[in-house]
Image (cartoon, grey):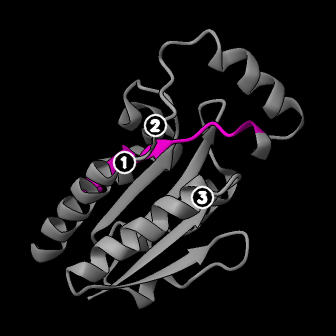
Amino acid sequence: MNILIAYATKTGTTQKAASLLAEALAQKGVKADLFDLSVSSPDVTAYDAAVVGGSIRMSALHKLARRFIAANEAALLKMPAGFFCCRCGTDDTRSLLAPQIGSGLAGHAAQVTALGGELDLSKQKGLDRLIVKMVSGQNNAMRPDGVSPERVAAFVEALMEAASGV
């Protein structure tokens, strides 16, 4: 089995999560190819399954991830797929992402979840930096606990289960 992991990152957390997913899949003997969507746009149809991830800013999935998903929706609906984001929010991720990836894909997906998040002010710029400073000090619903190995493992298990049913 060959799995595509395409991601869009702003500060590197999503890249870290994508790499952890690839490592977890490799431990199960599954080949996974990583693609940074700011560098290239892979051919989804060349894979048996796909994972697409992106960072979240102001409740919006990274625009490169949204564009990639929209452009490849038909192909993604024909294979096991999973969608993840990196964020510090604790509210329901599926409800947040479903309108952005489409209800069809959200319902089809093996997983639609957050793998964790980081708030590193040194990686923030401009307005993002100001907002992170303001929100992080007063919002108890934000948990910058890093990328969760447990969430990565659960994501991989769900994707593998969906892929075995094909």
| Quarter residue 129 falls in | top right
Q: Which residue is mark 3?
A: 65
Camera sees residue 72: yes
The amino acid beneath tag 2 is Asp
Residue found 52% across the figure and 38% down from its top: 87
In space, the residues marked 1 and 3 are separated at their CA atoms by 21 Å
Q: Is residue 112 above or below residue 20?
A: above
**Residue 75 rendering spot, x and y as whole percentages:** 42, 74
Is there a contact, CB below 8 Å, between mark 2 and mark 1? yes
Q: Is residue 155 above or below residue 137?
A: below
Is residue 48 magenta-colored? Answer: no
Q: Secondary structure at mark 3?
A: helix
Q: Secondary structure at mark 2?
A: loop
Q: Is residue 142 above or below residue 101?
A: above
Residue found 57% across the figure and 12% down from its top: 139
Is residue 114 magenta-colored? Answer: yes
Q: Which numbered disc covers residue 166?
A: none
Viewer-nearest residue: 97 or 152 = 152
